[in-house]
Image (spheres, rainbow, N blue to C red):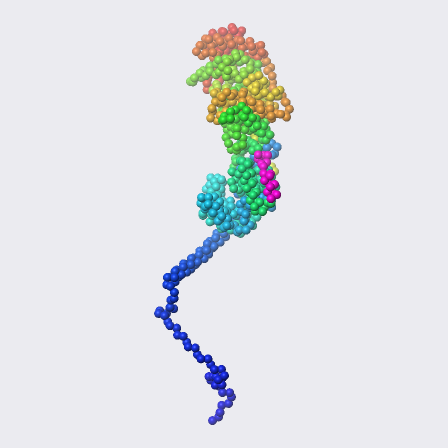
Amino acid sequence: MKQPTGTPTRKGRSPVADKRNPAPADKPTKVKRKSRGGKPPRRGNVVLRGISGTFSLIWRVIWGSAWRLGMVVFLIIGAATAYFYSGLPTAQELFDARARGSVTMLDRNGKVFAWRGETFGTVDSDQIAPVLKHAVIATEDKRYYLHPGIDPQGIASAIKINLASGRGPLEGNGGSTITQQVAKLLCLGDSFDPIRWKNEAEFEEDCRVTSLWRKVKEVPFSFALELKYSKDDILNIYMNRSYLGAGARGFEAASQRYFNKSASEVNASEAAMLAGLLKAPSYFAPTANLERSQGRAGTVLDLMHNQGFLDDTQLAEAKAHPAALSQAAAARAGGYFADWVMDTGPGFLTSETTEDVTLQTTFDQDVQKIAEGAVKRIFDEKVKDNSKAEVAVVVMSADGAVRAMIGGRDTTVNGAFNRAIQAKRQTGSSFKPFVYGAALEAGYSPADVVQDGPLTIHIPGGKDWSPKNYTRRYHGNVTLTDALKNSLNTATIRLQEAVGRDEVRRVAHDFGIVSNLTTSPSLGLGASEATLLELTGAYAGIRNGGTSVAPYGVVELKIHGDDQPLMGQLGGLGERVISQRAAGQLIYMMQQVIQSGTGGRAKLGDRAIAGKTGTTSSYRDAWFVGFSEQYVTGVWMGYDDNTPLAGVTGGGLPAEIWQAVMADIHKDLPKLPLSTVSPDGSGIIVSSGGSTPKVVTSGSADDPLASALAGAMQNAEGQRQAQAQGGRMVTAPTEVQGGGGGGGAATEGSSSSSSSDDALSRALNGILGGN
């Protein structure tokens, strides 16, 4: 058998190898004992194992829930952020949030003196002084450039402060970042809806209400702002939209309002004052209380110093020179005038304008200050400290351009009751020039004679009316000039009834007394009501030579940015009411009121002036209105509740206030004569005739014979006096209808003291009068 060749295949271990490297003995295999149920055996204390397992389970549940909930919240915030982000416009579109525009008023010299509405001025980030930015950041959000819109550290600190102060966690300090405050200013994306909200102020007030839900919404909205805009853009939105008191919206407007300079020009103390307004704009406004505003600015300066924005030297310099208001802001002049101008212009261009409007006005700040100073001086010197008497003053040029207006003793208020234009009061004897103006226009002369004596007017269907003079004394027959300068009531009523009440009403109305004028005989004594502006404007018509004027305050109106005015002057010269001759004669007569009559306290040395006093029944109103060649000024005094003035007449304190105002206004003005016409000696005898309603009795109405005799004798004597003075006797119709126009030309030979049907009276008149 053939033997196999090659290397034999060996299985197993080689004997030789086994001898060289003996194999290790096999380790005994440990047999694992199976526990019951196939689980490993338990070890340790069962209780501890149970507690540990419970906590482990709870932790796994919490952790699992937390990260899942966190993921859900993250997704929700992310979705909300994306939603808000998608609706945000460019930063520039968010600068101006006003639904209404503003009105800036310039005086006659082109200087700003008042604002209405919310003024606004857009500025970019590089146009704001760095010190102003630092002041805002130091005050509102010192970690502004470090957080992503929400500052957890600031919120936690605010909650701690609120709880320590006994408030709720969300009451008081909110810990809001500037970004969150911008979110509030934007009302979290909501816009003003005029259907839902009564006005913009109510809408903004609701936006500022803090609630938990709004705090939650602030988070994604703030993140959206941070993603959409740069930090400078967000700060710029904040500084352009924030309300800073006194109607100023934004730091540029506030800087112009308080300091009359741009926000790029403010220094450290001014910047601190502006930044301090953010906490409570109306309360800390320097126009409301400068000292309080300066104190708040000092706190802001300390914050700026603590955060490294100011060094020791800069801090000391700023505190040594606190911010002060500009001259216009400090004066706060023209509040009553500004309110009046806003009322006289069309609403869509003034009080309700959606544009920024500039009004060029007739206002004179110097004249206003003089008037305010004069009123204060007279009240300080001559009125009791606790007196509640009020005053109103209007100063205008002869063409009706109003230069100054005071509507009450408090001259620093806006929107207050303006007694110069809103208070309708009885005019008293200050109405009498219209009676005499009507008479002069009808052909009477200042030298004509009228009887001043007891008078009773029979009013059909009513009680007899018997006017009396202020002194309760009578002067007999007097010239028209003397009757006006001494403010004689019975003489004035006789003249009124001779001229006719309808004619008196026409003259007064055409001169500008647009209030309802009574038709009763008391018309001539100022029983009707008028405002001080109406009465002063009417006197300007007299001064103007008989041509009426419409008082005005607006010269032109422009929309901001436009070169051409949108509206021009709203008043001025009107139609002729009485002739120049009649006006000149009336001015002459009114001069005598001041030179030797009831208005003596109004004298201005040798300067030519004219005017008239006025006091109503029971001393409820006291007036003095008068004019020089340059100015027309009216003064009223009284109580708002119609309490009688104690011993005050138009020739007293009102005349003194008028004199004080006019003396200071005219200090550097030339002494110019008034355009007067002296009495020329001609006169007209007026008597009743035909069917003209008849008027008047002299003496007692209970004794017709005595009345007729006395009247005839006075009439005859008056004719002789009138002839001696170059004038003629004025007689009135012998009956008056109390509610009618009254008066008319009377037939020659009639008497103001008897009935035309009384033969005895006619005979006595003929004998005693030489007819």
Q: Residue furthest top?
A: 767
Tell me: residue 473, above or below residue 547.
above
- x and y, in percent, of residue 516 in the image: 49, 25
> Does any portion of residue 83 appear in the rendered image?
no
Q: Residue furthest left?
A: 36
**Dominant secondary structure of the magenta stretch?**
helix
- x and y, in percent, of residue 99 in the image: 52, 41
Q: Residue furthest front?
A: 45
660 sits to left or right of 458: right
**How many numbered badges does the structure rendering display?**
0
* Residue at position x 58%, y 29% in the image: 369
Tell me: residue 691, above or below residue 108.
above
From the viewer's side, name the closer residue of 587 and 731: 587
- x and y, in percent, of residue 337 in the image: 55, 31
Q: Is residue 137 magenta?
A: no
Which span is picked out in magenta? 312-330
> Does any portion of residue 294 appear in the rendered image?
yes
225 sits to left or right of 703: right
* Residue at position x 63%, y 22% in the image: 672
Q: Is residue 319 magenta?
A: yes
